[in-house]
Amino acid sequence: MGILQTVVDNFILIVGITPPKPEKKRAATIIIGTALIATVVGLVALIAFLITRLNHH
């Protein structure tokens, strides 16, 4: 979970979210990491959809 932990820690610092307590850090990493991955996958899917849609017109 090293890379995911680093990404989540940087996201927390950039956005200004209060860092989780040490006992909740693993759960917060999983939740925030899942949300970030889902957002990226959703954006890629939306962009791919728009590109294919625009190419058919």
Image (cartoon, helix red, strand yellow):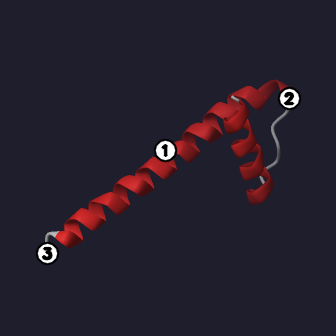
Query: Disc 3 residue type?
Result: His
* Residue position for label 3: 57
- Which residue sits furthest right? 22
Between circles 2 and 3, the one closer to the viewer is 3
Side (left or right) of 38 relative to 7 = left
Q: What is the quadrant of residue 7 in the picture? A: top right
Q: Secondary structure at mark 2?
A: helix
Provide residue 12's location: percent of width, then percent of height. Answer: 76, 49
Between circles 1 and 3, the one closer to the viewer is 3
Q: What is the quadrant of residue 24 in the picture? A: top right
Q: What is the quadrant of residue 16 in the picture? A: bottom right
- Which residue sits furthest top? 23
| First reached walking from the N terminus: tag 2 or tag 3 | 2
Which numbered circle lies on residue 22? 2
Vertical order, 53 against 35 (above or below): below
Provide residue 25's location: percent of width, then percent of height. Answer: 78, 31
Give 39 or 51, whichever is nearer the viewer. 51
Which numbered circle lies on residue 38? 1
Q: Secondary structure at mark 3?
A: loop
Give 34 or 3, whichever is nearer the viewer. 3
> What is the spatial separation of the Cα atoms under label 2 and label 3, in whole angstroms?
53 Å
Residue name at image x 64 percent, y 31 percent = 30
Q: Secondary structure at mark 1?
A: helix
Query: Disc 1 residue type?
Result: Ala
Query: Disc 2 residue type?
Result: Pro
